Image (spheres, coloured by chain):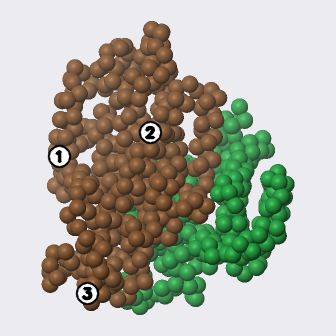
Chain colours: A brown, B green
Amino acid sequence: MATPLLQPEGHQHSEIDRSGTAATHTPDARPLEAPPVQDLGDKKLSLFRLLLRDKFATLAALVLMFVGLVAVFGPMLVGDLATRQDLLAANKPPFSLDDGWGYVLGSDSLGRSMLGRLVVATRTTISVALPAVGIALVIGSLWGVWAGYHRGLRETISMRIADVIMSFPSLLLAVVVLYVFNPSLGNIVLILAITRIPIYLRTARAESAELQSRTFVDAARTFGSKPTAIIGRHVIPIVLPTLLTLATLEFCYVMLAESSLSFLGIGIQSPDVSWGLMVSQGRQYLQTAWWLSILPGLAIVVTTIAANILAAWLRIATDPAQRWRLSLPRKRGGRRFGTALKGATK
Amino acid sequence: MLVYLRQRIISSLLPLVVVVVGVFALARLTGNPASLYLPLNATEQMRADFMAREGLDQPLLVQMADYFGGVLRLDFGESLRTGEPAAAMALRAFPATLQLAATTMVIAIVAAVLVGCWAALKPNGVADRISSFVSMAAASIPDFWLAIVGIWIFAITLGWLPTSGVSGPEAWILPIATLMLRPFGVLVQIVRGAMVSALSEPYIKLARSKGASDARVVTHHALRNAAAPALTVAGDLAVGLVNGAVVVETIFGWPGIGKLMIDSILQRDFAVLQAAVLITAIAIFILNILIDIGYALLDARVRPTVKA
C-alpha cells in the first residue's frame, strides 16, 4: 500500500505529442511504441488488448465486474431470501443442494440464506466504498493540483493539513466521529472520504508542482490562459491516470476500513448488513458454524485482491515508459501477479 | 541538530494540538454533552446533576479553559463505568498495547530485513516470491478476518493455542501474527526496493573488488544505506499499527488501549475514550520525534537541508 507511485514521465511526452502545444522533447525521451498521431479511441482499444494479454489482470477485472453486477442487480434477484427467517433451518452447512440453490452457501443462526445475505451485503459494502473513494478522489485531486500549481503559501498550508490528518490513526478518527454522530451510511462514507483525501492531495500536489514548471505550461501561460484553464486542460489530463490507479488501490483500503468499522460495531448497523458486519456476527458461532464468518471474509479478500492486481496492472499499463513490460512474450509459468508488483517497486 | 529537532517537534506538535481541540469541538458539536457522556437511558434528573457536577452549565470559554487545563494535567474526568479517573485507566491499559506493538514491530523488522535482503540478492527467487505474495496479502486481507481464521484453525480445530487472553507465551502468537501482517508486507517491499538500488551502486562494486565477503557487502555497505527509506515509512507504520491494535485487541481480549477504546464506545464512556485517544496521540507524537532523531543520526544529509 505504501509503495510509492512511479513518476509517469512517459505520459508527459505522449501528452505533448498528442496536443502538439509544444515540441519540447526532453533529451531522454524514449521512442514511443505507438505512433504519436494515435487517437484516443485507438489507445483505449490497445489498453483493452493489453488487459487480455495478462491472465491475472483479466481475471481481476472480471471479478470486479461480477461484484459490481451483483451489487447492482443481485438484491433484485434474491428477493426476500436474505431476510426470510426459518429457525428450523438454522446453521445449515454450505455446499449442499438439499434446500435448493438459495441455500448453497448454508444458512445463518436465524435460518436466513447466506447467499442472499452475501448478495445484499455486497450492495451495502460497495455503496460505502465507491462514494467514499469518489469523494476523496475528486476533492483530494482538485485540491492537490490547485495547491501544486500555485505553490507558495497555498501549497504549504494544504500539505500541513494533509500531514495532520495522516499523522492520526484513521480508525481512531472514525471511532471518535462515529461515537459523537450516529454511525449512519452517510457519516461512514464521509469519515472514510475525509481520512483518505490526503493521499490524493499529496500525489496530485507532487505531480502538479512538477508539471507547472514545464515548458508547455509556460507556453500556455504566455498565451494568457487562466490558471483554472491551464489546470483543467494541461495538468489534470496528465495527472489523471496516476490518480485513477491510486483510486483503484484506495478502493481496497476503504473497503477494508469499512469492514473493520462494521466488525467493531461502529460501522454499518443491523438490520443493514455488510461483509464486515457478517464476519462480526458470525464470530460467536465460530465453533459450530465456521461459514458464517469465513465466507463473508473470503468475499472481502477476493474483491480486494482483484482490485489490487488490477491497480498494479493499471500502474504499468498507463505508463508508456513501462508498458513494454506487458507486451513481452510470456515465459512459461514464470509470470505471476508478481510481475506487476515488481514493476511497481523498481 | 538542535535546530532540526526543534523544527521537527514544532511540526509534530501541530497534529497533537489539532486532536485536542478537535475532540473538544466534536464533543460540543452534538449540542448537549450530557447525551454524549451518559448512557442512552439516563433520566432527566441524572442529566441535570451531571451538567452541574461537570460544570457544563458554565459559559463555553470557561469550559474550554477547564478542558485545556485538564488535558495538561492529564485530567479527563472520571469513568462512568468504574468511577476511576479516566487517565489512570488509559495509562494502565497502555503498557499492554506497547508490549504487543513493540514485540510485533521488532519481529516484523527483523523478518522484513532478512526476507527483503534475500529477495534483493536473488530477484525472482523464492524469497522474492514470498515477499510479493505477503505484500499482496497484507494489502488485501482484513486483519480481523485473518485473526478469526487463525482462531478457527489453531484454537478451535487444532486446539494448540488459546482463543484469547494473556495467559502465557503461546497467547502472544496469534495476536502478533495478525498484527504483523501489514507492517511486514509494507516493510519487506521497501527493504527489497532499497536493497536492489543500493546493491547496484558503484561503492558496492568497489567493496566487492577490494575483496569484501558477500555477507559484509550486504550488512556493512548496502544495508546501512537501505535503512533510511525503511525508517521513513516507520511513522506511517506506527500509525497503522494503532489501527491494527484496536482490531486485534478486541478479538483476542487483550487488555490494551484499543480494547479500552472500543469498550468505552460500546458503553458510552466518553471520558475514557477521550483519554485513550489523547494518550495514543501523545505516544505517536513521541514516536515521530524518535524517528526523526534516528533519521538524522542515520543520514547526515538530512540535517543541513532542513536547516536551510
Q: Image quadrant of residue A326?
A: top left
Q: Earlier in the sequence, mark 3 or mark 1?
A: 1
Could you say whether the residue bearing mark 2 is in a helix, strand or loop? helix
Viewport quadrant of the C terminus of chain B = top right
Q: Residues within 10 Å of mark 2 (few under 14, many from 20)?
A: some
Q: Amino acid at mark 3?
A: Ala
The answer to the question of whether label 1 and label 2 lie on touching residues, with beta carbons closer than 8 A, is no
Residue sitting nearer the eye, A69 or A162: A69
Q: x, y percentage for residue A289? A: 33, 85
Q: Amino acid at mark 1?
A: Arg
Q: CA distance from mark 1 to mark 2?
A: 31 Å
Could you say whether the residue bearing mark 1 is in a helix, strand or loop? helix
Residue sitting nearer the eye, A179 or A200: A179
Q: Earlier in the sequence, mark 1 or mark 2?
A: 1
The residue where tag 1 is placed is A53
- Identify the residue shown where x is 23% and y is 67%: A79
**Is residue A243 visible in this depiction of the protein?**
yes
The residue where tag 2 is placed is A138
Same chain? Circles 2 and 3: yes
- Identify the residue shown where x is 37% and y is 55%: A127
